[in-house]
Each structure stands twice: as C-alpha cells, then as structure tokens.
Amino acid sequence: MPTTEELGIRLAEEVLKAVEETGDEALIAEVNRIVESQSSALQEAYMAAVRAQRAAAAAHRHVEARLKKARLAKASNEPDPTPGQENAPQS
C-alpha cells in the first residue's frame, strides 16, 4: 500500500500533466479542495509535491538555458590553438 507521500506525488504528477495539456491552472486548486475535504495529510503531501515538481522544473529550465548560452558562446569563439603550437612561428 502506497504511503500518503507517494499518493500525493502521484496525484501531483497526474494533475500537473493535465494542467500542461489543458492549460487549466485552476485544476490544481480544485483537486486540492477535493483532497483537503477527505484527508489533510494527503492534501499536504499533494501540495508539497506540486510545489516541489514545479520548483524542480523551473530549476531544470534555468540550467538548460545556462547551458545553451554557454554552448552558443563557446561555438561563436574561435577554436583554441592546438596544444604546443601557441608560440609556433607563422608562415
């Protein structure tokens, strides 16, 4: 039998997928009210999971944006000289 935390995580994942598909942010609050009326422990686990998953997604987007910026900057610079050839005479 899953723990309350596991149920909250699963529910949050399902709801966030539905929000992504429908664009209906109100679904999070609607499900929160339904769950809260039945189990305060599950409601807390659900909302904690929603916040955690959204925070993790925002952090992943930030890291990806930084990596993209760094890769673009690196690609736009001239390549480094071949090791050992820095002081070689130009012909």
Image: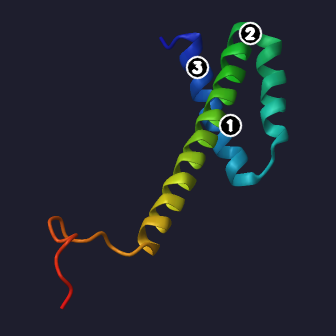
Side (left or right) of 51 relative to 33: left
Q: Residue at x 63, y 27 (%)?
A: 52
Q: Earlier in the sequence, mark 1 or mark 2?
A: 1
Residue 74: x, y in percent? Answer: 43, 65
Mark 3 and mark 1: Cα distance apart in space: 12 Å
The label shown at residue 41 is: none
Residue at disc 3, secondary structure: helix
The three-letter code of the residue at mark 1 reads Val
Residue plotted at (68% across, 45% down): 18
How far apart marks 3 and 2 lie (CA) works out to 12 Å
Residue at 68% across / 20% down in the picture? 48
Furthest-bottom residue in view?
91
Position of residue 45 relative to residue 78, above or below, is above
Query: Which mark sits nearer the N-terminus, 3 or 1?
Result: 3
In the figure, is residue 49 to the left or right of 30? left
Q: Which residue is mark 3?
A: 7
- Within 10 Å of disc 1 (Cα), the crowding (few <14, some 14-19, many 20+) is some
Residue denoted by label 2:
39
